[in-house]
Image: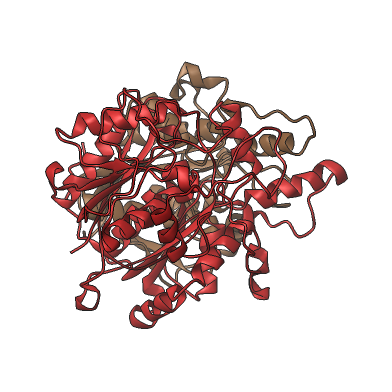
Amino acid sequence: MECMSLLGFGACAPDADIRAGMPFPVSDIIRDTIPPMLRRRSSQATKMAFTAATLACTNAGRSTATLPAIFASVAGEIQTTDQLCLELSKADGVVSPSAFHNSVQNTVAGYWSIAQQCSQPATALAAGLDTVAMAMLEAWCQLACHGGELLLVCYDERWPDYLAPGSGAPAFASAFVLAAGVVEDCVAQLGKPHIGTARFSAEWQSQASKMPILAAVPLLDSIANCAEKQHISLSPLQSGWQVTMDGLHQNS
Amino acid sequence: MTIYQALPPAAITAYQCVSAAGDDVEALYAALMANQTCLKPLGLFDIPFETLVGEVSTALPALPAHLKTYQCRNAQLALKALNQGGFRADVERAIAQHGATRVGVILGTSTSGIYETENAYFDLQRDGSMPADFSFLTTHTAQATAEFLQQELALQGACFAISTACSSSAKALGAAQRLIAADICDAVLVAGVDSLCRLTLRGFYSLQLISPEACRPMDADRKGINIGEAAALLLLERPNPDNAGSPRLLAVGESSDAHHMSAPHPQGIGAAAAMSQALRLAGKQLEEVDYINLHATASQLNDLSEAKAVAGLFDNPPPCSGVKGLLGHTLGAAGAVETIVSLLALEKGFLPATCGLQQVDAQCQIPVIARLDAAIKPKLVLSNAFGFGGNNASVLLEVV
């Protein structure tokens, strides 16, 4: 596989200031993207991931019911897990069965497949500060091995303050519909993720170290605003995972 | 609809396992031969109900001083497995051969270092703050033990965790095979690791799935599951003349039930899709499968669903069995642990027993074997792992 083609993307942030500060369209949580049965009980993580994923599919002109999916998150359902750990630390603590099954890292993957009636494989991936980079690498491998198209969603809700003081905010989700090889009229082409010399600006290095899921922002910025071929870092770590983006096929 | 292309197999050049059966793969093999349950009352912490667990009760090694930030039971289990037999030497040989950037680490885990997080929350409850040495991103989050293994082995390649509950490490094998097939890596260390913790014990209890006694997979009188812990490590490499005799990972079939978060599809549609996908990816026929290592947790719904999946997919299902009555359900580690059980079956030439099974559930119309069968030497084996969220994986293995 020479490259993968980006067919559409979406982004979501619940905080209005964060949305206003991003150099590409970012949506608030869109209630209609979450099935009525999930609206009240689902986490911020699930709602953000659903919003970004639905926007990406809509922008790509693809059905939400047919794409294999990769859901990447540093801390997964950390708010639900936090509540469970608080209960477990009390003498008379109560563990709710639904909170328990909603605490797994693949909660979003499970609800997405159920809500969209999508029986394609759905995976849940985590890689700490390299989460966005490894998610893009897994997307590359799936497309290189199996062909076709897939949905990649990178999301993290806000972490409770005491878990990693100074880190874990702001909540952010981004989603990408990607296809194997060259697709006409694609938004951009992405090369094989690899280790290289591209690095974040000092500002993004700092922000993405505190909230690693923001490592997708420079890529989203380039996709939305840049037509030239660029090497774009995907990680705040010095490991140096990056991707080459070619925006020549973009219309804007 | 994605059209799946055939995938080149990966050689499994080394494997090692720490479990309730003992500290290494030889102890696991001996336990499979003896078929006496390794489940015992829980010693690690107190719980407010009766059950048995598959606990690793031998001493766990301390992490090296420079990697103390990764200190948690999960990483200790992984380190213990790494140091058994010649496994570490096999990995180091692969690193010398392929280079540190070409050897990846993929972890499958459901709860990572949450046992230490639970302990830290007792401090939080009492003192109003987490202990000073609590390190969220190097113990709690899912990739922590993958990063620990990467640093312990001085690797510089791809490194991540798959966390899809009880299918985690089966899917990690699939991700590892793709990394090699896509020429990102030449070798990948796959680790399935989960430790006992309060969250899973009490969580499954809240779902009324915990058995008070040793579990009885596929039995008419099964009463639920027992939780276990384990670290199962496998070294995957690109096939070459040097590893021509090693068993092969042919494919990992994956699917989603799209049905329910905590209950399987009643007809096992997703489970059947994962098994048939594995065969399709490898270009193998149903009739060629010699043995199915079942997920068989001994929960009422899971066993019935899996039996329906097998009975629906195969006209003449091969012999089937499950080992959770021996080791407990090791959750995110189960896919890797039971892949190793299947590799032992392939390499030593036997079919494992279903420990605890007395009378096969009449609704489970598949040939579940209760006793070890040393007369059948399987060549092609499917090993199933199904998790919350209807997340299914089926691992297809072969000996040449």
Q: Residue A46: in sight, yes or no?
A: yes
**Quarter where residue A84 is shown:** top right
Q: What is the x, y in percent for residue A163?
A: 71, 48
Residue under the point 52% across and 50% down? B38
In the rendered view, would you say B371 is above or below A116?
A: below
Quadrant in which the N terminus of chain B appears: top left
Residue B390 lies left or right of residue A95; in this view the side is left
In the rendered view, would you say A135 is above or below A62?
A: below
Q: Residue furthest bottom?
A: B96
**Quarter where residue B321 is shown:** top left
Residue B21 lies left or right of residue A57; in this view the side is right
Colour mapping: by chain
Quadrant in which the C terminus of chain B appears: bottom left
Q: What is the x, y in percent for residue B264?
A: 39, 28
Residue under the point 50% across and 35% down? B225
Residue under the point 21% across and 61% down? B399
Q: Which chain is red?
A: B
| Residue nearest the viewer, comparing A115 with A179 | A115
